[in-house]
């Protein structure tokens, strides 16, 4: 038991240091010079879609960008009427095209190959966009930037406990903080911007077409490897993209398992170390709960849970404030108890899905 506690303490120390580094990164973002760029390059907005006739970014035509831009809608093997409906909107500014292959990665490649913009922005078809979204992304660049990671939050909540919303706050905290200190560990394909030339140069999907997900992560890793410290986070409320939550618990777990299944293909050591520490911390929380229940002494178990909740809190509060929402303490505690189970089950499920 003493050895178990000793290892658990080491894991939680590593976990705490990691979370504090991310929070430090967010403090740097808050202090970053907010002066706007004077240049607004040509931007190509890419939106892959599949069977989404009624939900293609409802506010797409309301976008207000200070420079030239085009919209490229890519049909990823639709079987309903979406493609035919969208073709009616095609014009010089809006292009509707077919995926040259299958899957989101091929759809993005198809769009990038035909794009005219110096910069490419990618989002999902069911997302809600702020009218100043493109400006906010572009204004987050500096002279060394090759990629911008944009904030993504849940548009609404269905389970009453805010699990997905709080989860996304934590994920965005880690995304923002890690990018700020030069070691990005996460990206979201619903909100990212990159230079066309860099995308073509790094060819991010050449070794992972067999994986159905990861268009965002593999692109981020490829750019980080080629151009270290060139990835920025768009710390602007206007840059927020809102996405839909998983509608059922089954859908939620299937989605997390898909995310976890691509982990074995990652090569970035910083990302792998962070993932391992998060998994081990979650595993120790569950094990101490089970052990505490077995010996009828929950002191140690609740001690580890309390440490994790306290360490995560500054990051989650910073992001909730950024999103201009209040954190419900009851929901936060509930998510802190449930999320370690989600992490462990997702990793186990991802391992078997990979095999």
Image (cartoon, rainbow, N blue to C red):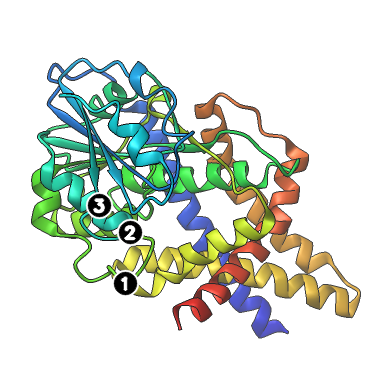
Q: How many angstroms separate mark 2 from mark 1 (CA)?
A: 10 Å
Residue picked out by circle 2: 103
- Tell me if mark 2 has few (under 14), some (14-19) or many (20+) residues whose alpha carbon lies within 10 angstroms of its own: many
Q: Is residue 93 above or below residue 182?
A: above
Question: Which residue is tagged 1?
Answer: 210
Q: Is residue 306 visible?
A: no
Residues at badges 2 and 3 in contact (C-beta under 8 Å)?
yes
SS class, disc 2: loop
- Percent x, y of residue 229: 21, 48
Report the mark closest to the observer, 2 or 1.
2
Mark nearer the N terminus (2 vs 1): 2
Residue at screen point 55% across, 40% down: 244
Q: How far from the left and from the top, in percent, is residue 134?
A: 29, 25
In the displayed structure, does residue 147 sit left or right of residue 340? Answer: left
Image height check: is 258 above or below 239?
A: below
Q: Answer above or below: position of 77 versus 13.
A: above
Instruction: Report x, y in % for residue 86.
Output: 33, 33
Residue identified by numbered label 3: 99
Distance from disc 2 to disc 3, alpha carbons, whole Å, reads 8 Å
66 relative position to 246: left or right: left
State the separation of the CA atoms marked 3 and 1: 16 Å
Q: Nearer the viewer, residue 43 or 291?
A: 43
User: What residue is at 21 percent from the left and 31 percent from the top?
Assistant: 141
Identify the residue shown where x is 24% and y is 57%.
106
Q: Are marks 3 and 1 in contact (CB under 8 Å)?
A: no
Image position of 149 with respect to 86: above or below: below
SS at mark 1 in the image: loop
């Amino acid at each position: 038991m003493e050895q178990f506690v000793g290892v658990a303490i080491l894991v939680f120390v590593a976990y705490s240091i990691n979370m504090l580094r991310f929070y430090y990164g967010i403090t740097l973002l808050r202090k970053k010079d907010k002066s706007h760029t004077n240049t607004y390059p040509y931007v190509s907005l890419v939106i892959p879609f599949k069977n989404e006739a009624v939900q293609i970014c409802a506010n797409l035509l309301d976008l207000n960008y200070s420079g030239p831009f085009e919209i490229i809608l890519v049909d990823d093997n639709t079987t309903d009427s979406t493609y035919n409906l969208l073709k009616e909107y095609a014009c010089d500014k809006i292009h509707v095209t077919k995926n040259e292959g299958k899957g989101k990665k091929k759809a993005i490649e198809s769009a990038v190959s035909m794009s005219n913009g110096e910069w490419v922005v990618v989002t999902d078809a069911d997302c809600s966009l702020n009218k100043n979204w493109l400006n906010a992304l572009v204004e987050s660049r500096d002279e060394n930037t090759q990629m911008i990671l944009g904030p993504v939050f849940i548009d609404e909540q269905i389970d009453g406990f805010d699990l997905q919303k709080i989860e996304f706050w934590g994920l965005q905290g880690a995304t923002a903080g890690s990018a700020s200190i030069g070691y990005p560990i996460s990206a979201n394909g619903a909100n990212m911007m990159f230079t066309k030339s860099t995308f073509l140069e790094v060819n991010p999907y050449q070794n992972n077409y067999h994986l159905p997900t990861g268009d965002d992560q593999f692109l981020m890793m490829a750019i980080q490897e080629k151009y270290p410290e060139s990835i920025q986070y768009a710390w602007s409320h206007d840059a927020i993209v809102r996405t839909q939550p998983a509608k059922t618990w089954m859908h939620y777990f299937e989605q997390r398992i898909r995310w976890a299944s691509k982990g074995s293909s990652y090569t970035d050591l910083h990302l792998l170390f962070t993932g391992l520490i998060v998994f081990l911390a979650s595993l120790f929380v569950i094990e101490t709960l089970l052990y505490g229940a077995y010996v009828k002494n929950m002191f140690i178990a609740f001690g580890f849970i309390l440490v994790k909740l306290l360490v995560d809190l500054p990051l989650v509060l910073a992001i909730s404030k950024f999103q201009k929402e209040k954190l419900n303490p009851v929901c936060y505690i509930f998510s802190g108890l449930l999320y370690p189970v989600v992490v462990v089950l997702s990793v186990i499920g991802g391992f078997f899905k990979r095999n």
